[in-house]
Amino acid sequence: MDIDARGPRFGAAVTTVVLAVTLITGSVWLLAWQTLAFALGAAGGVARSPYGWVFRKAVRPRLGPPTEFEAPEPPRFAQAVGLAFAVVGLIGWTAGPQWLGSAATGCALAAAFLNAAFGYCLGCEMYLIVRRVTVRAK
């Protein structure tokens, strides 16, 4: 079942803000929250992530009906990629080196910003590349 394409972009916008504030403040707790949000999105899909819930309950009812849909698998894969970067960021900020935490968080921020601002999902594109490679390999 396809999902409203505006949902993942909304989640990316919230993620962009959370990760930017994380980098500005150095808050490990805020990065831990974002890591949890990524984990829930990777496990249950973006519609079941905290930001997906907010979109569904508070944002979508105020918008017109969706005109663009997308398959749920690419955004879910993107959440898993974000989760990997967030985990590396947490490791860097809690166990060191500090630069690793900042770099990993910055990479996740850049990807979230691209999706939020331009609708270009790096994780989704990675998913499509992986699918093409694995289908050809069979």
Image (cartoon, rainbow, N blue to C red):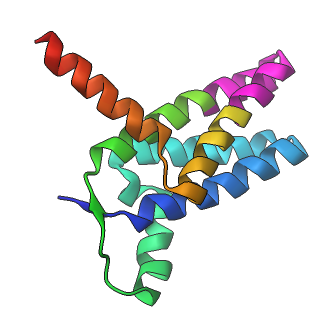
For the point 60% across and 58% down, the residue is 117
User: x, y percentage for residue 68?
Assistant: 30, 68
User: x, y percentage for residue 95?
Assistant: 79, 17
As drawn, 51 above or below 15: below
Q: Quarter of the image holding residue 125?
A: top left
Q: Quadrant of the C terminus?
A: top left
Q: Any magenta on residue 89?
A: yes
Identity of the residue furthest to the front in this view: 118
Q: Any magenta on residue 8?
A: no
Q: Which residues are magenta?
A: 86-105
Identity of the residue furthest to the right in this view: 25
- Asked if one can make out residue 43 in the rendered structure from this viewpoint, the answer is no
User: x, y percentage for residue 72?
Assistant: 29, 51
Q: Quarter of the image holding residue 97?
A: top right
As rendered, which of 72 and 33 lies closer to the eye? 72
- Asked if one can make out residue 67 in the rendered structure from this viewpoint, the answer is yes
User: x, y percentage for residue 34?
Assistant: 63, 46
For the point 22% across and 59% down, the residue is 2
Q: With 69 as the anchor, is 105 left or right in this view?
A: right
As drawn, 59 above or below 115: below
Q: With 51 as the anchor, is 61 left or right in this view?
A: left
Q: Quadrant of the N terminus?
A: bottom left
